[in-house]
Image (cartoon, coloured by chain):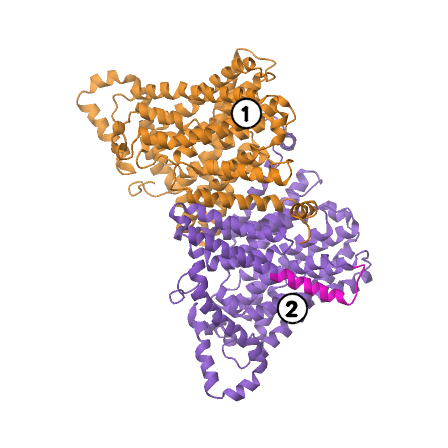
Chain colours: A purple, B orange
Amino acid sequence: MGVGFTEFFSIHLATEHPQVIPISVFIVILCLCLVIGHLLEENRWVNESITAILVGAVSGTVILLISRGKSSHILVFDEELFFIYLLPPIIFNAGFQVKKKKFFHNFLTIMSFGVIGVFISTVIISFGTWWLFPKLGFKGLSARDYLAIGTIFSSTDTVCTLQILHQDETPLLYSLVFGEGVVNDATSVVLFNAVQKIHFESLNGWTALRVFGNFLYLFFTSTILGIAVGLVTSYVLKTLYFGRHSTTRELAIMVLMAYLSYMLAELFSLSGILTVFFCGVLMSHYASYNVTESSRITSRHVFAMLSFIAETFIFLYVGTDALDLTKWKTSSLSVGGTLGVSGVITTLVLLGRAAFVFPLSVFTNFMNRNTERSETITFKHQVIIWWAGLMRGAVSIALAFKQFTYSGVTLDPVNAAMVTNTTIVVLFTTLVFGFLTKPLVNYLLPHDANQNTGGNGGKHTAPGSPREDATLPLLSFDESASTNFNRAKDSISLLMEQPVYTIHRYWRKFDDTYMRPIFGGPRRDNQPEC
Amino acid sequence: MGVGFTEFFSIHLATEHPQVIPISVFIVILCLCLVIGHLLEENRWVNESITAILVGAVSGTVILLISRGKSSHILVFDEELFFIYLLPPIIFNAGFQVKKKKFFHNFLTIMSFGVIGVFISTVIISFGTWWLFPKLGFKGLSARDYLAIGTIFSSTDTVCTLQILHQDETPLLYSLVFGEGVVNDATSVVLFNAVQKIHFESLNGWTALRVFGNFLYLFFTSTILGIAVGLVTSYVLKTLYFGRHSTTRELAIMVLMAYLSYMLAELFSLSGILTVFFCGVLMSHYASYNVTESSRITSRHVFAMLSFIAETFIFLYVGTDALDLTKWKTSSLSVGGTLGVSGVITTLVLLGRAAFVFPLSVFTNFMNRNTERSETITFKHQVIIWWAGLMRGAVSIALAFKQFTYSGVTLDPVNAAMVTNTTIVVLFTTLVFGFLTKPLVNYLLPHDANQNTGGNGGKHTAPGSPREDATLPLLSFDESASTNFNRAKDSISLLMEQPVYTIHRYWRKFDDTYMRPIFGGPRRDNQPEC
């Protein structure tokens, strides 16, 4: 070709389509990640996220060398890229693939971990950093920054643990970790946005209440929007039955509407993450029964693939970003200072999570102590739940970029320091904690003994209705024998538990009688949901 | 909400994610298109393209009114958006879904239509416009512009006709129209790029030859690159067998590699359109046999869906763009002048196509007159082939934008005039010619009599090997009876036909013995390809 490699590239860069090179390089690296991830699949020590981060770091180094120290980035990070293109498929897929029965079965526990937990963790991390950072000589952050840091480091990345836990072996644990992961992501982002709206100038006693009110408003409106879009899609798909003419149209409608739900939420300044999650739940509950068999298979795989690519993409980016020398140079912290600050954050993450996992588990167990239908969260399980939520991932990075940079660039030393610290914490927790997850789970739940540990695994027989319908005999048993004594004793428990089950039963009746005939879905009797 | 609709929108526009609104609006309109297209499916007069253009025009009007005459666009057109994101899925899907056997069976005819045809059409349109435009008072175009116009209006849009022709009823016609459509698109773009490279300052006798040489170089290197990427993907999928662990990875690899082939071609300044087409052919021939059943189904649907969305997107854009007042105002032509110029172009399109379809058909028939294995292209078929290629679509628009605008914007009156004229020609041919296609096809090929018209339809029995293997008995018949006489008579025909069949037979042997064991695919015996 006559010209040298770099020259050839820069000539091209200057002339035609500037995106072509980075896109090509990124796709090659993505493919590489997939292949390596596949080869390491049997090696359960290293998971997908770790692979992607490491591959990203290596490519970052190569690019740094090629560009002679100028840049380690293939693509310029845009938190818009993340929030508009990468996050929606991940969250939608979570909603679409969630085992709805399990999710709603453990609804209260999941919600208490996912919502109350984030609040507790945010408070601890915010106060902890606010108290400790100045002692380390790291100053210059505002009250808003500290609160933002609290939410940034309260969002977990549970992908890693889920790759190790087995849905069939430990269903309770799996459903709690998965459910919490989704709710937690949503809560963190909503809380982060609520924090942005605080007027710190006119801070008073009502502020905390207002943040909470704002949070509740966002939470409910977003959920309702997601449900509405999901129902509309289901209704349209059922009424028009596109499959009659072309399966392509059904698929296109599903993908487009899923994306639209997120966009609409953003348009109305709601939480797209919650909207798209519930849209996914509704679509898999109704819409996916209104399409042809091939569309059902295809949609499931498409959403999984999009989510997978988006996740890998993000971790790859985190890997390359770790080598962004500009940010390291701009940072106001020395190497020691950086280590100190990220050490503090990591410790607070450990504490913040412990501060709600163990108490809330004990509380849940206390509530369920006499109701045989709910399973106990043993101490070993609590440790795993605690550990599973220690990894920090894509959402943390994206929120940190949103808070501390302007389109991925920052010239402010304090902000640069926070971005580099976020990167370090994400790298450390994902790599080190992630690496230790497998041994930990193996140690706490030896593979063969899983079924007996805590007596929970064995309880779950087949997936599907039997488990749920077991509430009916249990209820009638409650009514008959030692009823009154139990009732008095379980008053709080009933207050917590009964409504959910009652609602659940009414809901199923309502679903069967009104919703499914309108929005689609099989008759309940012959539907072993999976 | 307190604030008015437009205010609410503009407030948002200014503050957060500026893409959110246009993306939301575009998705809503896309969904609308899908629904309307579905409802009109039985009404075979109006096809998908026409629906999309009309919906686009209506939305353009609405936006024009809302923005008080400022703009009719939802998104700013970027020819990069088209060439980097929209075109690749369309062409890849064409390659992936093409009936390879039919395509290669009629290879010579398709290639002569697709390649020689474009050259003839380009010459006629270029000379015609160069001769007639100044007579209409439309001046200011350079020689390069005229040649570009030739290629721009030589690229057909056959989607419309394909929606009307039935693969099972008229397989020859379908395969010719489909095959020509793909080759024609590729040839136009390659030729367009070759024209860009002409140095008009040092024009001499060798220029035409050099353009042709450049064309051949691009044609072959692009094809080879596509084949290479397809083979590598197939090999990787076969060797690693991703499906063992996760179907998501196989799918992701297929999608990413398909896209990569296009990007690599662009990176090396080749023709991405040809590369991605052949990558699609290879992937469906080998790779799709190396993945799990569900991935096979999913990939087929995903590619179809992406292509479908991209096509609808483009026609929607053309519809909204038709109302872009700025371009109309910038145009150097009066209303009458515009009508004259687009009338001239439309006439030249009609002539340019007639100038190769009929002669080349006659030539093909002449070549095949004694070989019973090839079907005659009757005059009625010729008319349909001619008509099927009259519609101008997405590629024309994109090339016109590339030639005459800078990222969709032009301030030059002459360039603006060319863009508006392209829009008019595309609208006119798609709407009017497209609308008349169905009646024409019905008139020429009455539905029940299809099988007898020209005696071609009936000849194709089942899809698959029988048809192709029929060449062997025919050959042995040639050898036995009136051989020598026929041989002398068919010498030219044999020169044209024999190599293809011989190559095809050798290729199949080679494919079975070497390629399939390495790159995947079933044994030939039990593979009724479809």
Chain where mark 1 sits = B
A67 versus B211 height, above or below? below
Chain where mark 2 sits = A
Q: Nearer the viewer, residue A165 or A235?
A: A235
Query: Marks 1 and 2, Cα distance to the nearest angstrom?
Result: 62 Å
Which residue is at 48% across, 37% downward? B90
Three-letter residue code for mark 1: Asn
Q: Is residue A204 magenta?
A: yes
The residue at which mark 1 appears reads as B421
Instruction: Single out the mark in the foreground, 1 or 2.
Output: 1
Magenta extent: A200-220
Three-letter residue code for mark 2: Ile
Please tell me whether mark 2 sits on a helix, a strand or a loop.
helix
Which residue is at 45% across, 69% downward? A509
Which residue is at 25% across, 21% downward? B370
For residue A116, the mark is 2
Q: Nearer the viewer, residue A7 or B213?
A: B213
Left or right for B510, reference A114: left
Q: Nearer the viewer, residue A402 or B465?
A: A402
